[in-house]
Image (cartoon, rainbow, N blue to C red):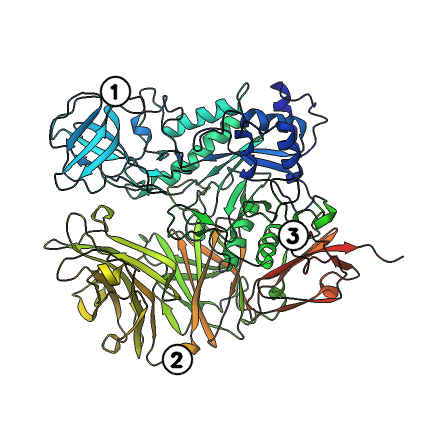
């Protein structure tokens, strides 16, 4: 464990530990023994309370393999007074335990050490012109502006915060004048008068004078506040095109300087092993180049923000060295699409909830496993990724408040099984009932129940096994490398070439920014299907090689799902004006939602809202499709819960235009209907007159002839292309999961449920137009039951919706097992301490951790 020698040596040089480098013990959480468990942020609160003693706190949080928490006031007030001292002392007294900082990687409280940052180091929302002179005066000032729509009071997580704004001069090239900038706090908005009232000279700035027409105002892009007593957080501008201060430094440079000082010799965090960056994104929202317009980090067609985040981690790694653990959020957005992509630079990721924060149904079981397995294979050594075991549901009527959902113990075990299957560590915010005398309970699976033994499973004797892989391949070997048998199954705008490594695919168009193809008509049998897919591909041009490509794999049978991937076109139409790309400042909304529940029925949807701020009109999205003979369009329409009383309805329309050279002709109307029902309204549209043509389907949501857009929140639900008259019972519902792709071949597993059609289509969509090699494909008619054998135990898991029987004699020949001895407050039925036989049946969505029993003499 060379990393730990480096860490301990650093601590020794700083005078923070008397342990010599040679004698320093390795970190338990990076050792061979499973499960690997540590305490999450529950450890940070008690030291902030003056009555808490170090001795009591250490005894409580020293029971696992380490701690993570906030020790700075960058996000949550009160964490810096005593936490660094407590955590550093803990590290000195428990050198084998990991000690990690939890740090916001996206934003900072502007009241926390921002003196060395300058105005261009933050991201702003769209700017508006200032229409009257502003004097340089203290106190409050009323300012007349061109548009008040984007300035918000009673906003933020709890609807109790007001925006922070910046006032700028304007340079000759139309940019914000960073050298003539004042930070202010919004007090009030008078939309009718076109004015805002602000508190002047805030956050270390001084009141300045601004001239009408030569100045503008913009709100900060913010998140939070994370706690009712905390402040809105300003977004860091980590883009590569971030404006630089007078010393030539970007925001990323300043942030690296801060962290290097805190973790460096004499720093208050010098004893820590490293840190985890919460909410670290590959994308952002707002204006990042200072021209006053929204670019969302993309300038000149290049994601400068995502690239900048990778370069930030590269610079930080160089400053802190390989002796520090660096981790970051890895499950932000659908499938983790929005998370940073610093593969090879950081040691691993956090998954906040498994598969994610609101998926206790385990719909994304496969995506969650693929994320962690790919990071395990592609992280900076030593790989250290973890599942923060938690699930949240909103508390009705209480903005910003969440609670734990009511789930059976079996779901908790399934999450823990996913961790040990992928070599992930486990911490948790969703805790079991606490024991007498302790602040926080510990899950039985993490320390062998009442035996209280950490790492009790011991060393893994091999990787986790998908039992489906041992069942017959329904393709009969057609997906093996070098075989050309898959070529006839490939559909879509791609070129294919069979090579010794597999089937190479590339877009027909050299300008394509994604690779999308369908493997059509794959055989299916039974209710469950497992697909094993091996991919490798060239890195994207113009981005760092560490930036892996996002892959979505979708399965459907009997229908073509139109709610997948990026739209082929999208925008808004304002009354009397030409259509333009989607502009959020208009109030228009267009967002894919994996689950929208109306009337007790959940459907995948596109959430829409027509524009309503400066002008009224419609919002639209498009799909390009090949229309087969005898096809029809099926979808459902719905509105939000406020619509029946306050809305006059949204007018939903479907139009179609024939595509020639990928350009649409004139659009013809196919469908129109108005609704304000808070329920799914099923609709069907015949496409008979479009049969055999490639067309662009345009889906429009208009506020209606009265231009009343009040509560016009609408939904297009489960939009599909189907054979006319086809029974829903013969349709396999659309399902999708993700994986990552880079130049190294990686095999991902995808478990699909409720298969009802004899054949299915597999749609693969990949970021970037660079070539990809499909190096292996097998299809298995089985659920994704899994197991992993350890030196001292066995873990089995059934993520399917039906019971599954495991043959332990076949999985682990010559060994016998017993259930864990469970705690009285946890699941004593599953963890009864009793021996188990050679066959054991798990219920739906369940897992079991078994102890190996010694052989009989």
Q: Mark 2 points at which residue?
A: 727
Q: Residue 825 carries which label?
A: 3
Residue 113 point in image, percent of width and height: 40, 24
Q: Residue 161 carries which label?
A: none
**Residue density around tag 2, few if under 14, some if 14–19, many if 20 or more, within 10 Å:** few
Residue 673 location, quadrant = bottom left
Q: Which of marks 2 and 1 is in front?
A: 1
Tell me the element at label 2.
loop
Tell me the element at label 1.
loop
Vertical relation: 160 (above or below) 553: above
Q: Give the side of residue 752 with respect to residue 58, left or right.
A: left
Q: Name the residue under label 1.
A: 206
Q: Residue at x 30, y 29 (%)?
A: 120
Q: In which quarter of the image is the N terminus?
A: top right
Q: Which residue is drawn at 31% across and 79% down?
A: 630
Q: Which of marks 1 and 3 is in front?
A: 3
Mark nearer the N terminus (2 vs 3): 2
Residue 730 point in image, percent of width and height: 43, 78
**CA distance for labels 2 and 1:** 69 Å
- Determine whether label 2 and label 1 are within 8 Å by CB: no
Residue 629 point in image, percent of width and height: 30, 78
């Amino acid at each position: 464990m060379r990393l730990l020698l480096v860490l301990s040596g650093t601590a020794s040089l700083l005078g923070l530990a008397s342990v010599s480098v040679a004698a320093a013990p390795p970190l338990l959480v990076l050792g061979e023994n499973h499960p690997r468990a540590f305490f999450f942020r529950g450890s940070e609160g008690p030291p902030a309370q003056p009555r808490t003693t170090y001795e009591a706190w250490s005894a409580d949080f020293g029971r696992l393999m380490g701690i993570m928490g906030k020790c700075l006031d960058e996000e949550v007030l009160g964490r810096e007074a005593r936490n660094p001292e407590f955590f550093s002392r803990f590290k000195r007294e428990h050198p084998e335990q990991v000690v990690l900082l939890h740090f916001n990687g996206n934003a900072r409280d502007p009241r926390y050490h921002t003196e060395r940052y300058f105005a261009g180091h933050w991201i702003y929302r769209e700017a508006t012109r200032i229409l009257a002179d502003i004097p340089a005066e203290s106190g409050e000032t009323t300012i007349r502006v061109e548009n008040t729509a984007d300035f918000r009071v009673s906003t933020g997580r709890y609807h109790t915060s007001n925006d922070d704004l910046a006032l700028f001069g304007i340079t000759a090239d139309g940019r914000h004048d960073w050298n003539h900038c004042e930070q202010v706090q919004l007090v009030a908005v008078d939309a009718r008068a076109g004015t805002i009232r602000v508190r002047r000279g805030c956050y270390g700035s001084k009141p300045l004078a601004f001239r009408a027409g030569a100045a503008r105002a913009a709100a900060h892009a913010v998140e939070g506040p994370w706690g009712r007593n905390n402040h809105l957080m300003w977004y860091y501008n980590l883009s590569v095109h971030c404006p630089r201060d007078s010393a030539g430094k970007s925001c990323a440079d300043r942030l690296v300087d801060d962290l290097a000082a805190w973790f460096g010799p004499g720093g208050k965090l010098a004893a820590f092993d490293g840190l985890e960056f919460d909410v670290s994104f590959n994308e952002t929202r707002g204006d990042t180049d200072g021209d006053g317009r929204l670019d969302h980090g993309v300038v000149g067609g290049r994601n400068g923000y995502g690239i900048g985040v990778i370069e930030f981690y590269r610079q930080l790694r160089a400053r802190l060295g390989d002796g520090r653990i660096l981790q970051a959020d890895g499950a932000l957005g659908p499938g983790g699409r929005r998370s940073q992509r610093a593969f090879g630079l950081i040691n691993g990721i956090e998954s906040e909830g498994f598969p994610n924060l609101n998926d206790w149904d385990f719909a994304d079981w496969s995506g969650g496993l693929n994320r962690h397995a790919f990071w395990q294979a592609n992280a900076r050594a030593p790989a250290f990724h973890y599942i923060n075991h938690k699930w949240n549901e909103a508390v009705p009527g209480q903005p910003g408040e969440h609670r734990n959902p009511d789930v059976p113990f079996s779901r908790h075990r399934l999450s823990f099984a996913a961790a040990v299957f992928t070599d992930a560590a486990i911490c948790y915010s969703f805790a079991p009932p606490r024991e007498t005398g302790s602040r926080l309970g510990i899950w039985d699976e993490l320390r062998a129940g009442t035996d209280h033994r950490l790492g009790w499973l011991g060393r893994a004797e091999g990787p986790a096994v998908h039992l489906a892989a041992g069942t017959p391949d329904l393709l009969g070997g057609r997906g093996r490398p070098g075989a050309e048998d898959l070529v006839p199954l490939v559909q879509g705008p791609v070129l294919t070439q069979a090579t010794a490594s597999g089937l190479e695919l590339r877009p027909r168009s050299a300008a394509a920014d994604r690779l999308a193809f369908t493997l059509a008509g794959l055989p299916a049998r039974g209710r469950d299907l497992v697909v094993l897919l091996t991919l490798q591909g060239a890195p994207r041009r113009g981005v760092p090689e560490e930036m892996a490509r996002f892959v979505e794999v979708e399965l459907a049978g009997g229908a073509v799902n139109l709610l997948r991937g990026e739209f082929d076109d999208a925008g808004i139409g304002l009354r009397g004006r030409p259509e333009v790309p989607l502009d959020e400042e208009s109030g228009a909304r267009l967002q894919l939602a994996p689950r929208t529940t109306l009337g007790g029925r959940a459907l995948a949807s596109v959430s829409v809202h027509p524009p309503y701020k400066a002008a009224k009109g419609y919002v639209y999205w498009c799909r390009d499709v090949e229309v087969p003979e005898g096809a029809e369009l099926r979808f459902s329409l719905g509105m939000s819960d406020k619509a029946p009383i306050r809305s006059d309805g949204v007018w939903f329309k479907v139009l179609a235009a024939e595509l020639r050279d990928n350009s649409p002709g004139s659009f013809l109307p196919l469908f129109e209907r108005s609704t304000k029902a808070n329920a799914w309204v099923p609709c069907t549209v015949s496409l008979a007159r479009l049969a055999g043509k490639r067309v662009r389907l345009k889906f429009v949501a208009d506020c209606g002839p009265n231009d009343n857009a009040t509560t016009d929140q609408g939904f297009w639900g489960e939009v599909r292309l189907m054979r006319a008259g086809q029974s829903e019972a013969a349709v396999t519902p659309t399902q999708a999961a993700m994986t990552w792709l880079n130049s190294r071949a990686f095999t991902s597993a995808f478990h699909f449920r409720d298969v009802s059609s004899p054949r299915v289509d597999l749609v693969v969509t990949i970021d970037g137009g660079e070539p990809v090699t499909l190096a292996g494909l097998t299809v298995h008619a089985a659920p994704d039951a899994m197991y992993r054998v350890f030196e001292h135990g066995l873990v089995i898991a059934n993520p399917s919706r039906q019971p599954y029987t495991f043959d332990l004699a076949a999985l682990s020949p010559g060994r016998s097992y017993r259930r864990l001895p469970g705690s009285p407050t946890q699941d004593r039925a599953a963890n009864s301490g009793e021996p188990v036989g050679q066959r054991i049946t798990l219920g739906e969505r369940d897992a079991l951790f078994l102890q190996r029993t010694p052989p009989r003499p």
